[in-house]
Amino acid sequence: MTVDDQAFEAATVAMRAELLAHCYRMLGSATDAEDVVQEVYLRAWKAFHRFEGRSSVRTWMYQIATNTCLTALDGRARRPLPTGLGTDASDPKVPVVADNETLWLQPLPDRALGDPADVATRRESIGLAMVAAMQELPPRQRAALILRDVLAFSAAETADLLDMTVASANSALARARKTLGDGAIPEGRRAAELTDDERRVWDEFCAAFERHDIDGVVGLLADEAVWEMPPFPGWYVGAEEIGTLTLTQCPAQHAGDIKMIPTTCNGLPAAGMYMRAVDDDGRDVWRPFQLDVISIVDGKVAHVGAFFEPELFRLAGLPGSIAD
């Protein structure tokens, strides 16, 4: 490693987690954000010898990251959740059909950000509902909002980062704030702040699925709970409706068909759901099925986002399979 390489690493290595969070807010995709951060570090490493210190290294890295995200977003549709499509709630008895053409919003596993003690502040504005709302904004408005309201850059710094006048940057920020309203987007309590009773709800949610206890799952849900599961575009409202969906369309049929491993995503309680299969030697094996991100409000599960992307299990540090 050269002296320049050592200087670059020393100046930037501690920023990787916060840049990943920034790119995730911009892109709405944990896997895309991971790829973009790799590109950001490559671009920065190639240009580091030209860095003249007219701004801090942190500001310079955020400029590269923001511009790389804006390039990635050019011409790309927003990443929604099913509830953001403007459709009515679905009938749980109608067979689900995946929409693999739409780019869907993804959660961000906390494990991808490293040690929770080191990155707690970086998670404050990456709640799933907030990131979903941000995807409604045009990319440059989204960037202005994140830079000002999340990262606390000044108006002048934001304008410089976005290569805009201060007036244009302030205008973009004002339009973004107006679109999002007061930002009072309901979301469950963060996993690190759960009460003992709320933690028992999380534990029992996992245990009920493992027991194939649909009534037990329904009993944990709020009356108006919402369940959505991209890439399936339908979404479901109400504990009984969600129970019907689970009973009739989940592949699990018996106790033990499912194993759940608790984790956290977007600061919220979550669980990796594994479904029983048979390996080449005829033995039982449980493979990744869906990653459930759970909002607990007033002691009930108010929202579940179920995500069917195996790569998210890797980002969450979950095993690729579970043997009997």
Image (cartoon, rainbow, N blue to C red):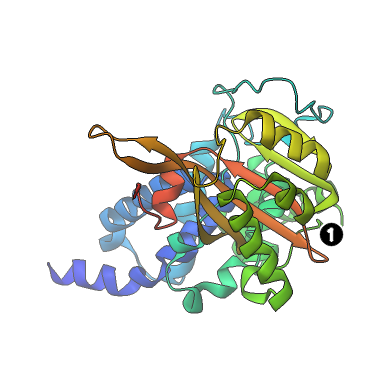
> What x and y, as percent, mark residue 203?
61, 64
**Residue topped by disc 1:** 184
Residue at 75 percent of width and 34 percent of height: 244
Where does residue 183 sit, x and y in percent of width and height? 81, 58
The residue under the point 47% across, 60% down is 19
Q: Nearer the viewer, residue 85 or 95?
A: 95
Q: Residue at x 39, y 58 (%)?
A: 317
Name the secondary structure under disc 1. Answer: loop
Above or below 292: residue 204: below
Query: Which percent across, then down, holds residue 170?
Result: 75, 56
- The amino acid type found where label 1 is placed reads Ala
What residue is rendered at 56% in x and 74% in y?
120
58 or 243, which is in the foreground?
243
Crowd around label 1: few <14 · some 14–19 · many ≥20 (10 Å): few
In the figure, is residue 202 to the left or right of 35?
A: right
Depth check: 51 or 73 in front? 73
Q: In the picture provided, is 257 more to the left or to the right than 232?
A: left
The residue nearer to you, when weighing 285 against 101, is 285
In the image, is residue 5 above or below residue 166? below
**Residue 262 as seen in the image, left or right of residue 243:** left
254 shown above or below 119: above
In the rendered image, residue 219, in percent from the top left (x then y), is placed at: 78, 53
Quarter of the figure with residue 47: bottom left
Rendered position, 296 above or below 211: below
